Amino acid sequence: MKIIETTNLTKFYGKNKGIEDVSLSINEGEIFGFIGPNGAGKSTTIRLLLSLIYPTSGQATIFGKDCFKYGHEIRNDIGYLPSEVFYYDKMRVKELLKYSASFYKGDHSKRIIELADIMELDLNRKIDELSYGNKKKVGIVQGLLHQPKLIMLDEPTSGLDPLMQQKFFDLILEENKRGATIFFSSHILGEVQKLCNRVAIIREGHIVKIEDIKTLRNDKHKKVYIKTNKHNLKVFTIDGISNLTQTDGEINFFFNGDINILLSLITKNKVNDVIIEEPTLEEIFMHYYQ
């Protein structure tokens, strides 16, 4: 079953582009990464899916239902953690969470205590007494207290220390084992690499790649270092070469293509040394950003 589907989803703010022609398909039970630099369109996409804002054009469905016609109904089964959390300062944490739980059917008091214990959150403190990291913990408990079918996370770990980040990742994996589908938006590659099955890379409001993590690791890109006394970069301006730089007698670049073509080019030129290695996953992502 497709939990999320979008077709040419587009949002303009006046003349300014939020996202354009974003098409995604996310399966039930998947942990799907949505990665891009700040300002790439990640939060806009999430807000559209939650029908917090409305599209300029395009379609989006969650659980097979139109996001914009049935948003109030769909949100009952969604847990959402925004990148920034804002609350009523004078309320105590337990009061806020009790109020949040009242929007969902059933008694969630036991679940609130369980989640607060995992995240080391003091339920008796007032919101205005909390650090940014602790406010983020409140958001995590709030988003998960009703055991939603779909969990949408927008830069969820900002403000959390490394220990809490790991507890949060463990919690999300447990929710996924329970059957929840996870939509995980981040600009931090390591987070996506830890958790996700597939990932979409968004750049300037456009999807530039949708791939599973293993396939991205097996990308044909090679990182090449050539030491040479000749400094003519034009020799290496062929199809498949990108990010070409030269420093102190060394030429560096990425190559994506038939390795035999690259080797033939190298052997035709006077070089002192050659290193060809696999790029890191982060370098592959940066290639798409650029």
Image: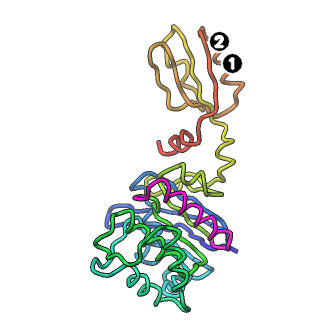
Q: Give the label on residue 231, or none.
A: none
Q: Mark 1 belongs to which amino acid?
A: Ser
Looking at the image, is 40 positioned above or below residue 8? above
Q: 166 or 125, which lies in front?
A: 125
Looking at the image, is 275 positioned above or below residue 154? above
* Magenta run includes residue 174: yes
Q: Mark 2 belongs to which amino acid?
A: Lys
Measured in 3D between alpha carbons, the distance from the residue under mark 1 to the one under mark 2, in whole angstroms, is 6 Å
For disc 2, the neighbor class at 10 Å (few under 14, some 14 to 19, many from 20) is few
* Element class at badge 2: loop
Task: Report the residue marked by disc 1.
Answer: 264
Color theme of the render: rainbow
Is residue 89 visible in the rendered image? The answer is yes
Q: 266 or 282, which lies in front?
A: 282
Looking at the image, is 220 positioned above or below residue 216? above
Name the side, left or right, on which 129 lies relative to 161. Answer: left
Q: Residue shown at 33%/72% (left/top)? A: 86
Magenta stretch bounds = 158-180
Task: Report the residue marked by disc 2.
Answer: 268
Where residue 215 appears, as percent x and y from the top left, is 68, 47
Looking at the image, is 264 positioned above or below residue 87? above
Q: Residue shown at 28%/72% (left/top)? A: 128
